[in-house]
Amino acid sequence: MTPYVKRREGMLYYKIIEEMILSFAPSGNTFIDVGNGGTDVITYGTYSRRIVVDPSSLPEREGVETIKGKWVTVPLPVEKADLVTCCQTLEHIRDYAPFVKRLFSVGTTVLISVPYKWSKGASKGHIHDPIDEDKLEKMTGRVPYISSIVREPEGPQRMICLY
């Protein structure tokens, strides 16, 4: 378990992400998780092929293909995926337009989570904070068909959107 994953163990928003996946995209052929960071998101649902794309080196996981590279440019072994998730990553991407375009061109269903209304400069590497519903709609060019604001006990809020 990476330190990133250890710090997030038991977070409520992962439970909500899992519930959304199980309710709206529970199974299929291919699931891609972008910017996974070693989390368990890629294990949710029933998919015959699971692919993680991350710019960092991640530990190998049984039943998961790990591709090291930048989402916008990395070659993928598939053209389409039933589900593409991107959790707590978009706020780090300076040129988000091609990143988002690829999420939606590859994914039939797309789930995005972002920090919700975090103060600018509160988290190192968050280029786009604060993000709210209007800002995410401008970033994605879409309105989600379901969204949820999740507040961690004694912690920050995150917005999870399913498209």
Image: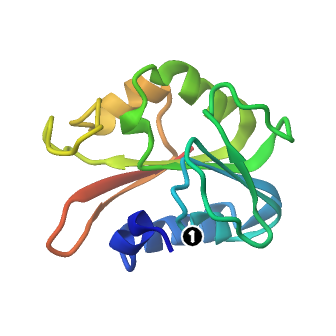
Query: Where residue 55 sits in the image (x, y, percent)?
Result: 57, 41
- Pick whichever, 39 or 97, lies toward us: 39
Q: Which residue is drawn at 86% across and 40% down?
A: 78
- Residue linked to disc 1: 40
- Pick whichever, 36 or 28, lies toward us: 36
Q: Which amino acid does label 1 sit on?
A: Asp
- Pick whichever, 32 or 146, lies toward us: 32
Query: Where residue 73 sits in the image (x, y, percent)?
Result: 68, 25
* Residue 39 vertical placement versus 109 (above, below): below
Q: In which quadrant of the rendered image does the C terminus lie? A: top right
* Residue 145 vertical placement versus 62 (above, below): above
- Side of 160 relative to 31 (left or right): left
SS at mark 1? loop
Q: Residue at x 13, y 41 (%)?
A: 119
* Residue 108 vertical placement versus 24 (above, below): above
Query: Where residue 7 sits in the image (x, y, percent)?
Result: 33, 71
- Side of 99 relative to 87 (left or right): right
Residue 148: image quadrant is bottom left
Q: Which residue is drawn at 60% across and 24% down?
A: 101
